[in-house]
Amino acid sequence: MRVTKEGLPFIIPSLVLSILSFLAGWWIFFGFSIILTSAFCFFFRDPIRRSSQNSDGLLSPADGRILKIQNVESCPEFSSPVTVVSIFLSIFNVHITRAPISGLVRELEYKPGKFFKAYKEEAGLENEYKSIFLEGDQAKILVKQIVGFAARRIKCFVKKSERVIRGQKIGLMYFGSRVDLYLPQDIQIKVTLNQKVKAGITEIAEVYDANNPQTD
């Protein structure tokens, strides 16, 4: 099983502890440290994902469950109403986030905040988050990575003005969290509440090119 390098500071110490406990014959500590090492390896797993580049579908930025689909009339980053799709990640989900579309990283924003449980309504407004504003050929979207009660750190893999491709790894959240995806309202949402989604695989919405409208 492949793991992300960001997990090594957690995995290596627990692995060393398990080896030392085994050599010393401390079987209770050995059992505990083996379980802890396995848990860290599982959490920081980095599965290979191959995202299709031959579709206009907007992909899920995270693994998890659709927590909310809501129309919002006002959002500082957008000049028109948006649809917010919230994805809740449990500690059992892969926590690497991926680019929903190909495009340019226009803005990055970090905001310190509180640590409400990620599934609570106030978490989207008051918790610590890192936002990535992407400008694609057919849509402008905002990916907001929000930490939860247990998650206290967000790692961003991209920089401002960097071009990303659909399905590319853009960040990592630690130990249970949430991703809010802000989308223009003139696109078709393709997921439903409580649906399970996979980053870089599941299509969240269908993006239409305004210069090449779809016909029946």
Image: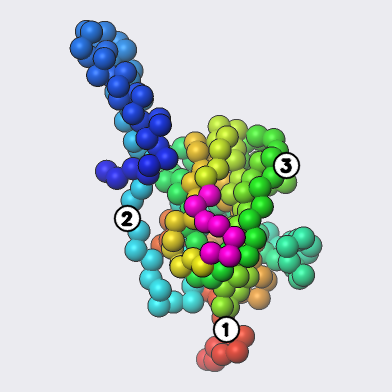
Q: Quadrant of residue 212?
A: bottom right
| Mark 1 touches mark 2? (CB < 8 Å) | no
Question: On screen, 15 above or below 42?
Answer: above
Q: Is residue 125 left or right of residue 26?
A: right
Rounded to the nearest angstrom, the CA distance separating label 1 from label 2 is 29 Å
Q: Quadrant of residue 133?
A: bottom right
Residue bearing mark 1: 209
The residue shown at (60%, 70%) is 135
Mark 1 secondary-structure assignment: loop
Q: Is residue 63 left or right of residue 129?
A: left
* Measured Cα–Cα span from mark 2 to mark 3: 33 Å
Residue beneath disc 2: 48
- In which quadrant is the N terminus drawn? top left
Q: Earlier in the sequence, mark 3 or mark 1?
A: 3
Residue 58 makes an appearance in the image: no
Q: Is residue 160 magenta?
A: yes
Q: What residue sits 72% from the left and 42% below the top?
A: 126
- In the rendered image, is residue 178 in sight? yes
The three-letter amino acid code for the residue at tag 1 is Asp
Q: Position of residue 107 (x, y in %)?
A: 65, 60
The figure's colour scheme reads rainbow
- Range covered by the magenta-colored residues: 156-162
The residue that label 3 is drawn on is 126
Secondary-structure class at tag 3: helix
| Amino acid at pointer 3 | Glu
